[in-house]
Image (tube, coloured by chain):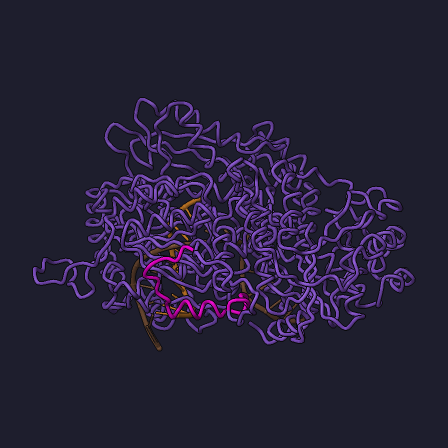
Chain colours: A purple, B orange, C brown
DNA sequence: CGTCTCACG
DNA sequence: GACGTACGTGAGACGG
C-alpha cells in the first residue's frame, strides 16, 4: 500500500467516526439491494422465495451494528420510480429495465428486515434515496455530527467532505476524498461538474458526447467548474471537442441538474430520532429464522446468551477448534476493521478467525451443514503433485465465511516417515477420515446446485474431484473473476491477489514443504502446519471472491465471465484429464538419430571454426564468428553480446559462409531433441500412459489460453524434421485424431471489426484472401497474380494484425522501411476503413487504459500513457492486436463451451484433447470420425454470427501430422 | 535468475 | 529529433 492510500484510509475512517460516539450511518438501502442481488449466489427460503439480497443486507446490518462507533443508523429507500428530475428531463433513468423476478419479492423483505433490526426506514415521495441521504448528511454535519454513507454508488461521492465519508459495504472499503479523486480525477465538490460532462448511460444522463470521465476531469481542472468551462468553450484547442461543448452546452447544464443531489428536501423524521436502539431480539430472531438464515440466527443467539438474556445455548460451538496464529494475523488486515476492534456491550460480534482440523465424519458433516446454510463454500485441495490428472488427493480445506475454515487431512503419513519405502518401525499415520467416506459426505454439497463452490484456479480441484466421482457444480473461480476484471493489469495468483486486495501475505508454500532437494510432498507435512496453510488458502479464496465478485456487476463484466471463462473450467479440466497419447518408441528412436546427426554437425562446425567450443552458447559462438573468423562486424545487443539469432546466421549463410548454415542446422536439431523428443518422453504419465498438459486460463493479456508442463501449443509443424515429432502424437487403438482449425480467423475479424467492405466481400466470395488483397493493393488482376506479389500482400495482412510498422514489415520482407511504408500507405488507401478503426482503437486505449474485444473482454494496456515514445508505440501496437487476437480467443472459447453438449446430443463419443489457439484436436472412435468432424465444424463455424463467414477445416488421421 | 534463442498461433 | 520496433505465448540452455 502506498503512503497516499494509507493516509486516505485514515482520513476516511476518521470521517466515519470521531470517537465521541456521535457517528451517523446512512445506509443506501435501494442501491444495496441491487448490488447484493447481483453479487451473491441465488438462495431461496424453504418456500422458494429468493432471499439472497436479504441475507446480504442482514449480514451488512449486523456488521454495521457491531461497529462501536455506530451511534445512529438509518436505512434510506427510493420511494417511486418517478421523481422531480423527470419533471424537467423525462428520459431520466428511462431505460432502466424492470427488476428481475427473483428480486421483486425481496424489496418488501428488506424493509421488513430493517424494521426487525429496529432501524428507521427513510423514504420520501418524489425524491430518490440519494437526495434524502444528502439532506441528512447536511443536517448532521450542521449539528456537528460525523456521517458515514454506506453505499457503493458513485453518485453519492459528491457528498464526501470533512465530516462526511463513505463506506462501500460490498468491497468493505472506506471512500474518502482520495478515493473520489481516483474515480473522478477531481475533488468531491467538483464531481457533479465532471458527471455533467461525462454523463451516465445507466441513468440516462446525457452529458456531452465524446467526453468521458478522464477528459471531463481534465477540463474541469483547467477551467474550475462547468459554467466557467462553457463560457470559455470557444478557446478549446481540439476542434471536435470545442464544437461538441458549444453544441451541447445546454445538455451539460441539464445533466448537472440531474446528478446534483438535493440537500434541502423535507426530512421525514427529525435527526434526533435516528438513534440505535436496543434491538427486539426475539423479533429479529423470528424474522431471520423465517428466512432460513440459520448461521446468523445462531450468531445472534450466542450474543444474547453471552449477555445473559437467554439461558439455553443454541449456538453450534464446534469441538476441538484451534486458533491458528496465522489466522490471527489475517484477522488484522486493514480491510476487516471490525475484527480487531473491541466490541461494545450491545454489539453483535463478528466471529473470530478460527481454523479447525477435521478428523472424523461427524465434524465433517457439520461443515457440510454449515455450507448449506450459507449457500457458499470455498474449497481447496492439497495434493502430492502439480499434475491434477494423476496427483494423489492429500487433503481438502473448506471455508464457509470469512474467519472460519477447516482442513480435512486424507492421505497424510506420519511426518517423520521416510519417503517411498517400507518402514515397519515408522510411526502410525494420523487419524483421518478414509478418503472414500469423506468424498461420499462431500459429494452431496459439492454437487448441490444451491451451494456455490468457490475456488482459486478451480480447474485443478475440479479434476481431482472428478477422479473421485464428483462433478462439482456450480463453481465460481476467484482467479478467473480477477482475470476478467483486471486482465493485463497484474497477475492473478492467489498470493499476488492477497497482497494486492487484502494487504496480507499468505504462508508461502516453501515454508511448509521446503525447497530444492529438501522439499517434501504435502502428505508428509505435520497436521498443524498443514491446517494453518490449507485452511488459510480456502479462507483467502473466499475473501477474494467476496471482494471481487461484486465488481463483475460494477464493471459490466458479468457476461464475459459467465459466458466465456467460467463455463470453460469443467471443459478444460476434462481435456487435461483426458491427455494425449504419445508413441514413446517413435520419440526415443528420433532422439537416437538426432544424437548421431548432432555429433556429426558438431564435428563439422568445430573443424570449420578451427577449434572446439560450445555451439549452444551464443556468447562463444558470437566470439568465434565475429572475433576469430571475422565474418563481418556483427551487431551487438544491449548487453554487449553479439547477436547470433537465425536472421543473422541466415545472412552469413547467404554470403557463402558454410559454418553459419551448419550452426543453423545444429540449432534446429538441438532444439527438437531437448525440448521435444527428450522432454516429452519424460512427461508421459506412468499412471495413464498419456501426456497431460496444463492449460492456463488466466495467463495471457488477450484472453488466449496458454499451455505448460509441457507446452503442447508449440509442437513443431513447419519443418520436415519437426513433422516427425508431430507424428508421435497418436490416437488410441481403434481411434483417429481429428483436427479442426479456423481458417484466417484473425484477418476475418479485422474485416469485421474495422468494417472493411472490400475485405468482407472477398471473404464472403470465398476468395484466396492474400491474392485478393494483393490484387486490390497493387492493382493487379487476380489472373496475373505472381507468388511473390501474393507473398508481399500476405506479409502486410499479418502486419495489420500485429499493429503494423514500416520497420517490422520491411524486416519481414527484406526491404527498406521506406519501401515498406509505401506499401502500407497504399494498403490503407485501398482499405480506408482500416485507418479510421486503428486510430479509434488507439484513442480508446489512451482514454480508458484498456481495449475491448467484440464480446466485451477488457485488455488493460498499462504502457499506453508511457512518457517514453518507444514504449508507447509498443503499447499502441498491442492495442491494435489485442482486440483481434482476443476476439478470436473469445470465439474459440464459445465453441469449446458448446462442444461437449453438441457432441453428446449427436451421440458422439469424441473427446476434446487440445486447443492450439485456432485449432481443436479430438480423439474419436474410427467409425465416428466423419460425423464428429461435421459436428465440430458446425459448432466452430456457428460460434459467432458476424458479417463475415467463419470457416473451419477438418482433417482426420492416425497421428497429429496426418490430421492437421 | 536474467538473457538469448526458437518452437507454435 | 529521438526512441527501438511487428502481436501473443513457454521452455531449454547458458552463465553469472
Residue A632 visible in image: no
Which residue does the image show at 76% across and 51% down from the upper left?
Answer: A123
x, y percent for residue A188: 75, 66
Q: Nearer the viewer, residue A642 or A783?
A: A642
Tell me if A725 is positioned left or right of A633 in this view: left
Q: Residue A559 at x, y = what percent?
A: 58, 42
- Whether A508 is drawn above or below A446: the answer is below
On the question of residue A913 being in view, the answer is yes
Task: Quarter of the image for the C terminus of chain A: give it.
Answer: top left
Find the magenta span and give its range: A315-339
Residue A127: horizontal and vertical position, in percent?
A: 81, 50
- Apparent side of residue A224 relative to residue A365 in the rendered image (left or right): right
Residue A930: x and y in percent read 37, 23
Viewer-closest of A91 and A915? A91
Horizontally, residue A789 falls left or right of residue A219, namely left
| Quadrant holding the N terminus of chain A | bottom right
Query: In the figure, residue A190 lies in which quadrant?
Result: bottom right
**How many labels sit on residues?**
0
Residue A467 among those drawn in magenta: no
Q: Which residue lies furthest to the left in this view?
A: A424
Q: Observer-nearest residue: A640 or A963?
A: A963
Residue visible at 37% across and 25% down in the picture: A908
Amino acid at each position: 500500500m502506498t503512503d497516499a492510500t494509507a493516509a486516505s484510509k485514515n482520513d476516511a475512517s476518521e470521517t466515519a467516526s470521531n470517537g465521541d460516539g456521535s457517528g451517523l450511518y446512512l445506509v443506501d438501502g435501494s442501491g444495496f439491494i441491487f448490488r447484493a442481488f447481483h453479487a451473491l449466489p441465488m438462495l431461496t427460503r424453504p418456500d422458494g422465495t429468493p432471499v439472497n439480497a436479504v441475507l446480504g443486507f442482514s449480514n451488512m446490518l449486523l456488521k454495521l451494528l457491531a461497529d462501536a462507533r455506530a451511534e445512529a443508523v438509518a436505512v434510506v429507500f427510493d420511494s417511486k420510480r418517478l421523481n422531480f428530475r423527470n419533471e424537467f428531463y423525462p428520459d431520466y433513468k428511462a431505460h432502466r429495465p424492470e427488476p428481475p423476478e427473483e428480486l421483486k419479492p425481496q424489496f418488501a423483505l428488506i424493509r421488513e428486515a430493517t424494521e426487525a433490526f429496529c432501524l428507521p426506514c427513510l423514504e420520501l415521495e418524489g425524491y430518490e434515496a440519494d437526495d434524502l441521504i444528502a439532506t441528512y448528511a447536511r443536517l448532521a454535519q450542521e449539528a456537528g455530527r460525523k456521517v458515514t454513507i454506506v453505499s457503493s454508488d458513485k453518485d453519492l461521492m459528491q457528498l464526501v467532505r470533512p465530516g462526511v465519508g463513505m463506506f462501500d459495504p460490498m468491497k468493505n472499503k472506506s471512500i474518502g476524498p482520495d478515493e473520489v479523486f481516483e474515480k473522478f480525477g477531481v475533488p468531491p465538490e467538483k464531481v457533479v461538474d465532471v458527471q455533467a460532462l461525462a454523463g451516465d448511460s445507466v441513468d440516462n444522463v446525457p452529458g456531452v458526447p465524446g467526453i468521458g470521465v478522464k477528459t471531463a476531469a481534465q477540463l474541469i481542472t483547467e477551467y474550475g467548474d462547468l459554467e466557467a468551462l462553457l463560457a470559455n468553450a470557444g478557446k478549446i484547442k481540439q476542434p471536435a471537442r470545442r464544437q461538441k461543448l458549444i453544441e451541447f452546452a445546454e445538455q451539460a447544464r441539464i445533466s448537472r441538474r440531474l446528478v446534483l443531489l438535493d440537500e434541502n428536501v423535507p426530512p421525514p423524521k427529525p435527526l434526533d430520532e435516528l438513534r440505535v436502539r436496543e434491538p427486539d431480539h426475539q423479533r429479529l430472531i423470528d424474522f431471520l429464522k423465517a428466512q432460513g438464515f440459520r448461521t446468523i440466527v445462531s450468531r445472534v443467539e450466542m450474543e444474547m446468551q453471552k449477555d445473559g438474556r437467554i439461558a439455553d445455548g443454541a449456538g453450534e460451538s464446534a469441538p476441538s477448534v484451534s486458533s491458528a496464529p496465522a489466522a490471527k494475523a489475517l484477522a488484522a488486515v486493514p480491510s476487516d476493521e471490525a475484527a480487531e476492534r473491541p466490541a461494545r456491550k450491545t454489539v453483535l460480534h463478528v466471529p473470530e478467525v478460527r481454523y479447525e482440523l477435521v478428523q472424523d465424519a461427524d465434524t465433517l458433516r457439520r461443515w457440510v451443514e454449515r455450507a448449506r446454510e450459507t449457500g457458499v463454500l470455498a474449497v481447496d485441495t492439497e495434493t502430492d503433485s502439480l499434475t491434477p490428472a494423476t496427483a494423489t488427493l492429500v487433503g481438502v480445506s473448506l471455508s464457509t465465511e470469512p474467519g472460519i475454515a477447516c482442513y480435512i487431512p486424507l492421505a497424510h503419513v506420519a511426518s517423520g516417515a521416510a519417503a517411498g519405502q517400507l518402514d515397519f518401525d515408522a510411526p502410525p499415520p494420523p487419524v483421518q477420515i478414509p478418503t472414500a467416506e469423506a468424498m461420499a459426505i462431500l459429494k452431496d454439497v459439492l454437487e448441490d446446485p444451491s451451494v456455490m463452490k468457490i475456488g482459486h484456479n478451480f480447474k485443478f480441484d475440479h479434476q481431482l474431484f472428478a477422479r473421485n466421482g464428483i462433478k462439482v457444480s456450480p463453481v465460481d473461480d476467484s482467479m478467473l473473476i480477477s482475470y476478467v476484471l483486471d486482465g493485463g493489469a497484474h497477475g492473478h495468483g492467489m498470493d499476488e491477489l492477497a497482497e494486492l486486495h487484502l494487504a496480507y501475505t499468505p504462508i508461502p508454500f516453501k515454508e511448509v514443504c521446503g525447497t530444492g532437494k529438501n522439499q517434501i510432498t504435502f502428505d508428509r507435512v505435520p497436521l498443524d502446519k498443514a491446517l494453518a496453510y490449507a485452511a488459510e488458502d480456502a479462507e483467502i479464496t473466499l475473501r477474494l471472491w467476496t471482494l471481487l465478485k461484486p465488481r463483475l456487476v460494477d464493471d459490466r463484466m458479468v457476461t464475459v465471465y459467465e459466458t466465456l471463462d467460467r463455463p470453460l473450467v469443467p471443459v478444460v479440466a476434462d481435456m487435461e484429464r483426458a491427455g494425449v497419447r504419445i508413441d514413446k518408441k517413435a520419440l526415443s528412436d528420433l532422439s537416437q538419430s538426432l544424437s548421431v546427426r548432432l555429433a556429426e554437425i558438431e564435428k563439422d562446425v568445430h573443424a570449420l571454426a578451427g577449434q572446439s567450443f560450445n555451439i549452444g552458447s551464443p556468447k562463444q559462438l558470437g566470439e568465434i564468428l565475429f572475433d576469430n573468423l571475422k565474418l563481418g562486424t556483427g551487431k551487438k545487443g544491449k548487453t554487449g553480446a553479439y547477436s547470433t539469432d537465425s536472421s543473422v546466421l541466415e545472412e552469413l549463410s547467404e554470403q557463402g559462409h558454410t559454418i553459419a548454415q551448419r550452426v543453423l542446422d545444429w540449432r534446429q536439431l538441438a532444439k527438437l531433441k531437448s525440448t521435444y523428443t527428450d522432454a516429452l518422453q519424460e512427461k508421459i504419465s506412468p499412471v495413464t500412459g498419456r501426456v497431460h498438459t496444463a492449460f492456463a486460463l488466466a495467463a495471457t493479456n488477450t484472453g488466449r489460453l496458454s499451455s505448460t508442463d509441457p507446452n503442447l501449443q508449440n509442437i513443431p509443424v513447419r519443418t520436415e524434421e519437426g513433422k516427425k515429432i508431430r507424428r508421435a502424437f497418436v490416437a488410441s487403438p481403434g481411434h483417429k485424431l481429428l483436427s479442426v482449425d479456423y481458417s484466417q480467423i484473425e484477418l476475418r475479424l479485422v474485416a469485421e471489426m474495422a468494417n472493411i467492405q472490400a475485405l468482407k466481400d472477398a471473404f464472403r466470395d470465398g476468395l484466396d484472401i492474400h491474392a485478393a488483397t494483393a490484387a486490390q493493393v497493387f492493382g493487379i488482376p487476380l489472373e496475373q497474380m505472381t507468388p511473390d506479389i501474393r507473398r508481399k500482400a500476405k506479409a502486410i495482412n499479418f502486419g495489420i494484425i500485429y499493429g503494423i510498422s514500416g520497420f517490422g514489415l520491411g524486416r519481414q520482407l527484406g526491404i527498406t522501411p521506406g519501401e515498406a511504408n509505401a506499401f502500407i500507405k497504399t494498403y490503407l488507401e485501398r482499405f480506408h476503413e482500416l485507418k479510421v478503426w486503428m486510430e479509434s482503437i488507439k484513442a480508446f486505449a489512451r482514454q480508458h487504459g484498456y481495449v475491448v474485444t467484440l464480446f466485451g473482454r477488457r485488455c488493460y494496456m498499462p504502457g499506453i500513457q508511457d512518457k517514453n515514445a518507444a514504449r508507447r508505440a509498443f503499447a499502441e501496437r498491442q492495442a491494435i492486436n489485442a482486440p483481434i487476437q482476443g476476439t478470436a480467443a473469445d470465439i474459440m472459447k464459445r465453441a469449446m463451451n458448446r462442444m461437449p453438449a453438441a457432441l453428446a446430443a449427436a451421440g458422439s463419443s469424441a473427446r476434446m484433447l487440445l486447443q492450439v489457439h485456432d485449432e481443436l484436436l479430438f480423439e474419436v472412435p474410427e467409425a465416428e470420425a466423419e460425423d464428429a468432424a461435421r459436428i465440430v465444424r458446425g459448432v466452430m463455424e456457428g460460434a459467432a454470427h458476424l458479417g463475415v463467414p467463419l470457416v473451419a477445416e477438418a482433417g482426420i488421421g492416425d497421428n497429429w501430422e496426418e490430421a492437421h
